[in-house]
Each structure stands twice: as structure tokens, then as C-alpha cells.
Image: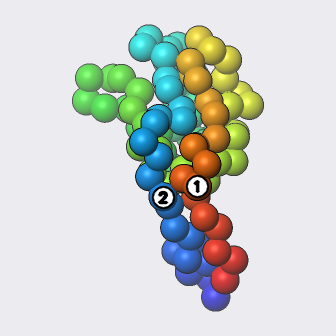
């Protein structure tokens, strides 16, 4: 079984609240770092150059939280109880 096969077994329960909230005007170097480091590819830069995050699919690894302060991510918390990733180890 490949890594992608194993990851495909995971499921996500959408949370009614955003568990990661980016700042309105984060530093561009921090944005570029988030786009590069997120193992799930949740961060991207839109056509207007703003940071966007699709929280569905977040692995809750905390890497983005560890490298950023509140100037980049206003909030990082685990999703509400029962929401977020449900790991299914193949
Ligand atoms: S917690 Fe991990 S997977 Fe989720 S957005 Fe941050 S870096 Fe990506």
C-alpha cells in the first residue's frame, strides 16, 4: 500500500468554525513559507496575492502554528470536538 493509498483512507468532518484564521495582511515571506511547508497543501496564494487556506484536509500537524506568530496566523486551534481529521491507518 502506498502512502497516498493510506492517506486516502482518512476522512474529515467539517467544523462549523474555522480552526485556523490567517491575519489580513501577513508578511509575504511568511505566506510563501506556509505555502511551501504545509504537507497537505492547504495554503495557497490567490490571484490578488492574498493568503487563502482550505481547512478541509488539514492534517492538524501544527507545522504552520510552529513557524508563525499571530502576525501571520491570528488563531490556530484544533477543530471542534468530533470534527477535523479522522485518521484511518491502512
Ligand atoms: S496544521 Fe499542518 S496540515 Fe494543517 S494547515 Fe497547518 S501545516 Fe497544513
Report if residue 33 is visible in the image. Answer: yes
Task: Name the residue at 56% across, 70% down.
Answer: 10
Task: Name the residue at 36% across, 23% down.
Answer: 50
Across and down, in percent, residue 80 comes to 57, 43
Q: Determine whether the beta carbon of the residue marked 1 sits less than 8 angstroms from the nearest atom of ligand 1.
A: no
Most distant residue in the left direction: 47
Q: Which mark is residue 82?
A: 1
- 3D distance between C-alphas at marks 2 and 1: 7 Å
Q: Is residue 29 above or below residue 77?
A: above
Query: Between 86 and 67, which is closer to the camera in this rendering?
Result: 86
Across and down, in percent, residue 62 comes to 70, 40
Element class at badge 2: strand
Q: Which mark is residue 13?
A: 2
Name which of mark 2 and mark 1 comes first in the sequence. 2
Q: Quadrant of residue 87?
A: bottom right
Element class at badge 1: loop
Ligand 1 image-quadrant field: top right
Residue 6 shown left or right of residue 54 in the figure = right
Q: Classify the position of the C terminus by image quarter.
A: bottom right
Number of residues whose C-alpha sits closer than 10 Å to that of mark 1, classed few (under 14), some (14–19) or many (20 or more): few
Most distant residue in the bottom direction: 1
Q: Quadrant of residue 33?
A: top right
Task: Name the residue at 66% across, 23% down.
Answer: 68
Q: Is residue 42 above or below residue 86?
A: above
Query: Between 25 and 14, which is closer to the camera in this rendering?
Result: 14
Residue 86 shown left or right of residue 32 in the figure = right
Amino acid at each position: 500500500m502506498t502512502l497516498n493509498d493510506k492517506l486516502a483512507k482518512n476522512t474529515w468532518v467539517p467544523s462549523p468554525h474555522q480552526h485556523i484564521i490567517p491575519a489580513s495582511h501577513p508578511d509575504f515571506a511568511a505566506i510563501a513559507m506556509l505555502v511551501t511547508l504545509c504537507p497537505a497543501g492547504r495554503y495557497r496564494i490567490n490571484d490578488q496575492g492574498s493568503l487563502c487556506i482550505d481547512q478541509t484536509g488539514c492534517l492538524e500537524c501544527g507545522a504552520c502554528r510552529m513557524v508563525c506568530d499571530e502576525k501571520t496566523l491570528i488563531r490556530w486551534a484544533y477543530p471542534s470536538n468530533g470534527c477535523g481529521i479522522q485518521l484511518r491507518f491502512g
